[in-house]
Structures are given as C-alpha cells and as structure tokens.
Amino acid sequence: EAQVTQNPRYLITVTGKKLTVTCSQNMNHEYMSWYRQDPGLGLRQIYYSMNVEVTDKGDVPEGYKVSRKEKRNFPLILESPSPNQTSLYFCASSLARGRSYNSPLHFGNGTRLTVT
Amino acid sequence: SQQGEEDPQALSIQEGENATMNCSYKTSINNLQWYRQNSGRGLVHLILIRSNEREKHSGRLRVTLDTSKKSSSLLITASRAADTASYFCATVISNFGNEKLTFGTGTRLTIIP
C-alpha cells in the first residue's frame, strides 16, 4: 500500500532533550516536506526536500533540522526542543519534480509532540 | 494574512444536504488544491484545479475556480456523516522562478445525522 509513515504518533518530552521524528515513503517520490499544524494558523512548512541531499527552509525552520540521505526517508530533528514547538507535525511527499507543486501531496498520519 | 482563506470557518448541515465551502486568495495562482482532514489525521488530497480550468468533478465533489474573483468553491453534494472533517484549500503561486504552496486555515464541516 502506498503510504507515508511517521513515527512516533505521540511524543511527550522535556525542554532541551533532542528528539527525532521519522518519516518514510514507499512511493519513490522525490519531493518530501515537513509541516506543523497549530490552531488558527493552518499548516506551515518547516523544511522541504526536492531530492536526495537537497533540502531547503520553509516558512518556519527555526529550531528544526532535517536530512535526506535516502530517497525514502526524511527525518525531522529537534536538537533542543522548546515548549513553543508543541504542535501536530505532518510529513508529506509528492511526485512533483523540481520546484513545482503540480502533483498532490500525500500526508502521513501526524505526530503530536508535547514539550514540557 | 493568508494567501488562501476559507469561508466559512465552520459549517453544520443536516445529512443529505449540500455543503459549500469557499476559498479566496490574493495573488494569481498556478493551481489550487483541496484537501480533507479527519480529526487529528493527515490531510487527504481531493481535487487539483489548474488556473486555466473552471470546474472539476470527482464523485460527489465539485470544485469551481473563478480567477477573475480570485476564488474557488468546493461543493459536496448529498452529504454523509463520513464527510465530517476539516477542508483546506492550498494555493500554488509562482515564486521567483519556483512555486510555493500555501494552505489556508480550513473550514470545519459537521454533518448532523
């Protein structure tokens, strides 16, 4: 089954404790992206990747890191989480090539992160 | 302010009725996409409509695009309880030779059985 898989589904952590949220897709998509969703703010893009070893900042990249060493995986890293990073996070992938959004995004089921 | 803004923010209708949600945007678009999100889950793509298209259908869904008014609407006909979800429009604009996709804040649709 074609899907985007995120883990974990729920995560509670403390300020400053490094964490990684994994994302994997099995559709051979070149494009992958991370979003955070907060009430009243919709989805905001954190980072995206057009292909292996190519990553770019989105609208809210501060406090986050990503890597794209393999086509299928795109982990989101919070080196020193803070309470303002408490949010619902989504990974997405797309067939789109280059810097184009002419194909639909496929989303994972989300990771609800709480930082205390 | 958002590039794409949905209206209304929330909508409650009886099962079987039609539901209409609107999306307005500010700058010219390359395409516009509608997504559905069930509570706390990932978004699911519904329809993509390009700037040179005026209407698209998919099952009970009908999307229209009026570029002169910079607006789009999503119509769900003969609504069902399973249609209860949040619906988001996403606008794709040209941005310095690339494209940028921006989501609106969504319409929360509740279907009353």
Image: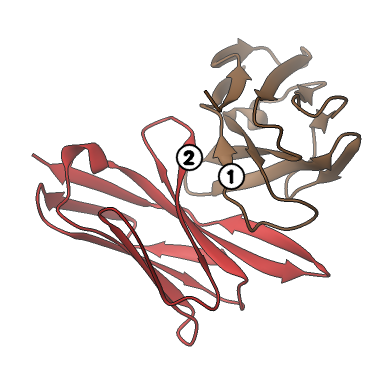
Q: Which chain is red?
A: B
Q: Position of residue A57 (x, y in %)?
A: 82, 46
Rendered residue at 11%/56% (across/down): B17
Say if labels 1 and 2 share a chain. Answer: no
Q: Chain of mark 1?
A: A
**Of labels 1 and 2, the one closer to you:** 1
Q: Is B43 above or below relative to A65? A: below
Residue B53 or B73: which is nearer the viewer?
B53
Which quadrant of the rendered structure holds the C terminus of chain A?
top right
- The CA distance from mark 1 to mark 2 is 9 Å
Element class at badge 1: loop
Under mark 1, the amino acid is Leu
Q: Chain of mark 2?
A: B
Residue B44 located left or right of residue B102:
left
Side (left or right) of A90 relative to A66? left
Q: Amino acid at mark 2?
A: Leu
Quarter-wise, where is residue B69 in the image? Answer: bottom left
User: Quick check: B106 left or right of B93?
Assistant: left
Question: Dots 1 and 2: beta carbons under 8 Å?
Answer: yes
Q: Secondary structure at mark 2?
A: strand
The image quadrant of residue A11 is top right
Query: In percent of the image, x 61 and y 52: which residue is there?
Result: A103
Image mark for residue B43: 2
Residue under pointer 1: A105
Q: Is residue B80 above or below residue B19?
A: above
Rendering colour (chain A) = brown
Q: Position of residue B47 (x, y in %)?
A: 44, 56
